[in-house]
Image (cartoon, grey):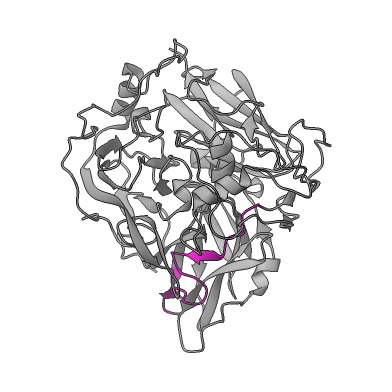
Amino acid sequence: MRTHTRRAVLGAGIAAAGTGLLAACSSGSGTDGTKGGHAGNPAGTPGGYVSPDGPEVTAAEAKRGSGPVRKVALTATATRLDLGGRTVASWAYGDGLPGKEVRVTAGDTLELALANHLPEATSLHWHGLALRNDMDGVPDLTQRAVKAGGSFTYRFAVSHPGTYWFHPHSGVQQDRGLYAPLIVEDPKEPLSYDKEWVVVLDDWVDGVDGSTPDAVLAELSKGMGGMDHGSGSGGMDHGSGSGGMDHGGMEHGAAHTMGGRKAPSPAGPSRMLMGATSELLGGDAGDVDYPYHLVNGRTPQDPQTFRARPGDRVRIRFVNAGGDTAYRVALGGHPLTVTHTDGYPVAHAETDALLLGMGERYDVVVTVKDGVFPLTALAEGKKRTALAVLRTGGGAAPGASVRPDELDGRLLTADRLKADGSVRLASRKPDRTVRFDLTGSMAKYDWAVNGRKYAPDQRYPVRAGERVRLSFRNNTTMWHPMHLHGHTFALPGDGPRKDTAIVLPGRRLDVDLDADNPGLWMLHCHNVYHAESGMMTVLGYEK
């Protein structure tokens, strides 16, 4: 074993050079010359709130410091992607899937210039980072969308180490190939390991038999026939972890909010998934029938192979970049030691399998044995798997349908972890509690927060310096991975620091955060179809 240094990462490149052609643009500006490119206070927005580029935001950024600048060029473009035995037309960052990894060190300043070669506007959201608000990448809230043919340079201090990723916050673009890992190294890394792998999980539909995410959303928005996935009225036992399966009629859902576009009519075969159930997820596991599930952009028929020597200690950084799928992950023949979740260290815990909701990340360390082993990600409740292979010696590779026993062994979820003492929130009573009822149903596809579909002028007020309790009440019969931008929160009972947490159907989850990053911050379900149909809102800092 040797102490961590900057290593070659299997399956992902270090993005010193970036990808593609780039239009020159100044730091924090777009091709229209708009400094920061933010929307400021849009027309009709309530006054009295911190603006995304306000002096409070500038002051908070100054406290993070300004270390060495890491420059990266990135092109969002239409391209053909080889998934391993299947080539599809999609959109991606460069010509690879996932996009080329960006790797920096805590304390650096990241300057990433995005060139938009897509046929529509886009943006970049830095999932999990506490960064300056006008770089958060939410069109109509923190910046203007980057128009087709335009460019924008994101520049911000990166203050905390961890496993993060980036993706658009425009429509359902994230469910194409537009995502990539962002790894922030710790200059004082306490872990010791020999190799490091970044493992990105994804559910895939784009370009398969004519399907697109926009067409999937159009189909889902009509609601499900047959049985109702639940009532938005909250008429269920709040202590119950199971959900009914009544799908109701065919009423149409609401306008699609994130991209400001009307989705097209459905194309390709039906992608509506009926009867996907999981006890782990409290009932309904998801609603999209994805034809493929991928590890680092590869199907189980042609998986990526990770190589190591027997006895190597390997750090694996897992990212769930899926749109509608939770993954249960295990490495055949090996226990996993969990060291981090959502970028923050936890008291080390050993497990056989992990559950990752969309947007969640986990870091584990494992001492690898001699042989060939499956790294399997089960699409929870959907009866499909994604696969990679670990090879440390001779032997035949496992087949695409392999199911290691560890998937049915000890399972770890975030609520069973404890924060490492170095990142545990100080004990303090909340100054403010904000309640968020998660509402909606598959019958009407009317997902919302507190019964209100997202609009950019929504604000739930907080003040800088407060300890804020977010109280989620899931009044639906589906699970929701709730994600807060620009902050981490603590799960109850000295639980881990997270930015994305699963709220099970019929359950309540209270999380606490310190309001220390002023601006206007999105709070939303990280099921991309739930968010796009309305389950998003805004936490706003009052001046």
Q: Is 485 in front, or is 289? A: 289
Residue at the outermost left position: 24
Query: Quick check: is 289 in the magenta stretch?
Result: yes
In front here: 372 or 173?
Answer: 173
Residue at (27%, 42%) from the top-left corner?
A: 108
Q: Main secondary structure of the magenta part?
A: loop
- Can you say whether 176 is above or below 477 in the image? below
Say whether residue 527 is visible.
no
Residue in front for this viewpoint, 244 or 523: 244
> Residue 343, can we see it?
yes
Query: Taking 15 as reference, is 538 left or right?
Result: right
Give the magenta part as a residue range.
286-313
| Residue farthest right in this picture | 237
Q: Is residue 147 left or right of residue 237?
A: left
Please tell me which residue is depicted at 58% across the width and 60% down the height of the picture.
269
Q: Is residue 182 left or right of residue 474?
A: left
Residue 240 at what x, y percent from top left?
82, 42
Residue that lies at the very extreme toward the top in this rendered image: 48
Tell me the residue at 51%/33% (across/down).
Answer: 257
Q: Is residue 230 left or right of residue 256?
A: right
Q: Residue 384 appears at what percent x and percent y?
A: 62, 67
Q: How many marks?
A: 0
Query: In the image, residue 516 lies at what x, y percent?
Result: 44, 25
Residue at the image position 41 percent from the left and 33 percent from the top: 138
Toward which corner of the image does residue 543 lie, by quadrant?
top left
The location of residue 194, given as percent across then percent down, is 39, 68
Which image quarter: residue 411? bottom right
Query: Taking 218 as reference, is 486 above or below it?
Result: above
